[in-house]
Amino acid sequence: MTAHIRIARAEDLAAIRDLLVETWHDTYDALLGPLRVEEITSRWHSIEALGKGIGRDGRAFLVAEVKGEIAATSLAVGEDGGRLTIARLYVHPRHQGRGLGRRLLKASLDAFPAVRTVRLEVEPGNMRAIAFYERAGFRTIGEGSDCGGSGDGIRHLVMEKVMDDKATSIPLGHEAHFATNLANWNERARVHSRDEGGTYRIGMFKAGASVLNPIEAREIGDVAGKRLAHLQCHFGLDTLSLARLGADVTGLDFSPVALQAARELAAETGLAAHFVEGNVYEARSLLTGLFDVCYVTWGAINWLPDIGRWAQVVAGLLAPGGFLYLLEGHPTALVLDEIEGRLCPRYPWRTPADTPNEFVEAVSYTGQALQAEAQRCVEWMHPLGEIVTGLARAGLTIETLNEHEELAWQLYPMLVPTGEGMFRLPDGVPAFPLSFSLKAVKP
């Protein structure tokens, strides 16, 4: 499902009114009674009342449009002192459970970048809404007897979210970097999911095989029955391979193109997996509950500017006793490039957060051409010490750290295939680690 989030217009008001009336009846008839709901919504959601929110400064009146239909709406009101009030956020019952509420909430918060606290009111019996806001980081701080100060005497809880460091959003100053990489990975997802060169072995997967590479297949252990979060899951091939091994798995990725391909692959193979759209720094607010395993492999953390914050996100996702499994290109290998048949240092071993390495690649690592407007990307190099220290400071215990002489992509032209989807240095070249893996446990 593709939804377009935009500012509400006057011509939307009738559709917004109808959405709110239907949603209120669906939500509150059992709590307040149909007659009372009809009376309240006829006043609160009249065209005249709704129209007062159109085009006013200090307000974000938004709609989510799906195939030309207004499927959800929200109203956020900025106040003095850095406070924001979510006055309204409703998703039509037919479109609930698809992430529209989360996207509208995020868009509302993004519209007020200087806000420090966010408050809202919710009816105590609306357990689904309470759970939604709790997952988004809100906590109940009080209660009242007249929701919205309307005089209707509706009891309500007051919920608040403190936005002290914007911990659930893209790191400050990196919005353009993420937008560049999103365009690049949307295009990569388009060509990778076709697998025209066979790199991803989708045909084997559809025939019933797991396509985990040898290292992760050997090291991940028994995942049957475990809750597993696959961060930066691309189009879900590993995610679904883990589901095939019995994991209760959720895949997170910021590319809607990748996730559409993942859902289609899940439907075709009949494998159960849940896919969520969002960047990894938002994972704690997007994913429900705690996980036994966080799984991050092959070209993931190089797209992140702040490895310390990433480690904190991972720690926040794990249940006590749960672990992170990380498998990545080795920093020693990543600083080198092949020039005239020789391996030479080319990239600094540590990339400053504000000056990432920039690349323009006409062809993806699978060999397929990328469209010209999506060839640019930016990356960050993270030393091994920075990664391990970040995880330790986040409260995780490093249980194993292994180095490997194989890699899942052809980093240098001289690398030779092993026959198992992996590459190694050719005979005659002194060996050094091309990848590393670690297991970090939450006490």
Image (cartoon, rainbow, N blue to C red):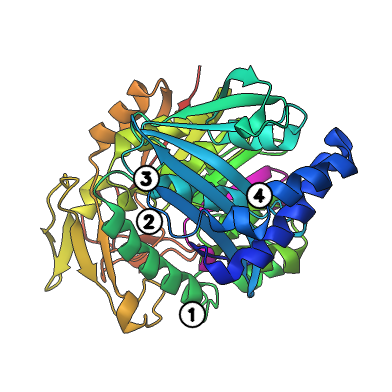
Number of numbered discs: 4
Q: Which mark is residue 197?
A: 1
Residue placed most toward the observer, 224 or 374: 374
The residue drawn where x is 31% and y is 51% is 302
Amino acid at dot 3: Phe
Spatial separation of the CA atoms under disc 2 and disc 4:
47 Å
Residue that numbered label 3 is attached to: 112
Find out whether residue 248 is within the magenta segment.
yes
Pair 1/4: label in front:
4
- Whether pointer 1 and pointer 4 mark residues with C-beta atoms closer than 8 Å, the reply is no
Q: Would you name the residue on which mark 2 appears?
A: 407
- Residue kind at label 2, given as amino acid type: Leu
Q: How far is the residue under mark 1 from the one under mark 3?
A: 45 Å
- Residue for point 12% across, 50% down: 348
Under tag 3, what secondary structure? loop
Residue 412 position (above or below residue 49): below
Is the residue 230 above or below the residue 289 in the image?
A: below
Q: Quadrant of residue 167?
A: top left
Residue found 29% across the figure and 63% down from its top: 411
Label number found at residue 90? 4
Q: N-terminal of the two: label 2 or label 1?
A: 1
Of badges 3 and 2, nearer the viewer stands 3
Q: Is residue 291 something one can see in this rendering? A: no
Q: Are marks 3 and 2 in contact (CB under 8 Å)?
A: no
Q: Secondary structure at mark 2?
A: loop
Verify CB contact (< 8 Å) between mark 2 and mark 1.
no
